[in-house]
Amino acid sequence: MLQGALQPLLQHSQLYNFVQWFYRRHAPEPGTIQLTQRRVYVLPSRQGVVFGISMVVMLIGSINYNLSLGYVLTFLLAGMGEVSILHTFRNLVRLRISPGRVDPVFAGELAQFHVHLENPDLHDRFSLALICKGRIVHCDVPARRVAAVSMPMRAEKRGWLALERITLETRFPLGLTRAWSYVRPDMRALVYPKPDDALLPLPQARPKSGDAISVGAGTDDFFGLRAYQPSDSPRHVAWKASARTDTPLTKVFTGRASSELWFDFDDLPRDFDTKARLSRLTRWVLLATQGRTRYGLRLPGTEVPLGEGEAQREACLRALALFET
């Protein structure tokens, strides 16, 4: 009964709100996040603690020696310290944070989460710091303006990468106090598999499937390399490339015949694990897009029809990124 009576009072306590926030796992917050007074916490910084101790020592010295100027100086500095607390708090409260654009990246790269900070008040916000997983980004937000901040995060593996909790803090103007708040905008980046950087052969064209590849000489253009097959002409064997890789390779040419390729997950060598297969398929998709080739992708349970261009590239890379074994 007593706890029920104290609950409304505790809900307005900053310490109570902070403890509840710290020990509770928060889901991403959709839409615009506004830093209300209950979400902003203020504590003395290390310099502020030293400053407070200095004020106590100066006050004791002024009382002991009855120094009038000592009282004036002590109370003047203490008053400046108290006013700085208000300015530090005001520098953060009422800010609005909204999610921005997030571009897909490959595994191992830095994903850039663009966060918008809106200042609805008539005073500028200075020396704001956004901290996420050890990375710090500083910015200022002018009055009645919106500032775009890019938060980098390392993409360790493929799939969806959600933005972690951001600590938004400031120590403006004197650095004696630290005001901070926690926000977690609902943002995520799509991480593609890391492409293989080895010398990659092209998949074999399938008969009666429209996968025609011209391997003749003449005016045809060189397209790439694929694994050697006994039926290949010795004139088309890439002897230099085969000597470097210890694997027989055949030159592939494109010409009058249209080139339609299928990249199949199950056609890759059996000793490849899932990660290696997806890396190889990602590399093939990138090469085929650069060569303006019409291609399709087959994964267990998923198939991307034949196509070409950037739309086909994005569809295939998305399927590779979200593939589940």
Image: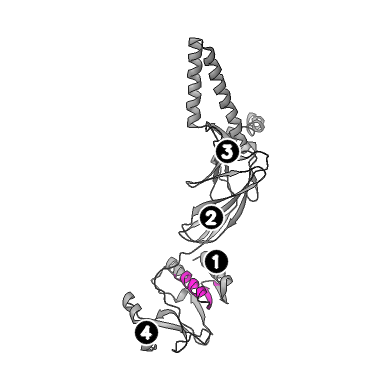
Dot 4 or dot 3, earlier in sequence: 3
Looking at the rendered structure, the kind of residue marked 4 is Val
Dot 1 or dot 3, earlier in sequence: 3
Dot 2 or dot 3, earlier in sequence: 3
Secondary-structure class at tag 2: strand
Looking at the rendered structure, the kind of residue marked 3 is Gln
Dot 2 or dot 4, earlier in sequence: 2
Looking at the rendered structure, the kind of residue marked 2 is Gln
Which residue carries the number 3 mark? 20
Q: Would you say 147 lies left or right of 154 here?
A: right
Secondary-structure class at tag 1: helix
> At x 49% / y 26%, what residue is drawn?
51
Q: Which mark is residue 318?
A: 1
Q: Which residues are magenta?
A: 280-302
Indicate the position of residue 312 as horizontal and vertical percent values.
Answer: 57, 72
Looking at the rendered structure, the kind of residue marked 1 is Arg
Alpha carbons under labels 2 and 3: distance apart = 30 Å
Numbered marks: total:
4
| Relative depth, front residue between 219 and 179 | 219
Alpha carbons under labels 4 and 1: distance apart = 35 Å
Alpha carbons under labels 1 and 3: distance apart = 38 Å
| Relative depth, front residue between 267 and 288 | 288
Indicate the position of residue 199 as horizontal and vertical percent values.
Answer: 39, 73
- Residue 313, compared with residue 66, is above or below; it is below
Which residue carries the number 2 mark? 112
Dot 1 or dot 2, earlier in sequence: 2
Which residue carries the number 4 mark? 237
- Mark 2, Cα crowd under 10 Å, few <14 / some 14-19 / many 20+, is many
- Mark 1, Cα crowd under 10 Å, few <14 / some 14-19 / many 20+, is some
> At x 47% / y 26%, what residue is drawn?
50
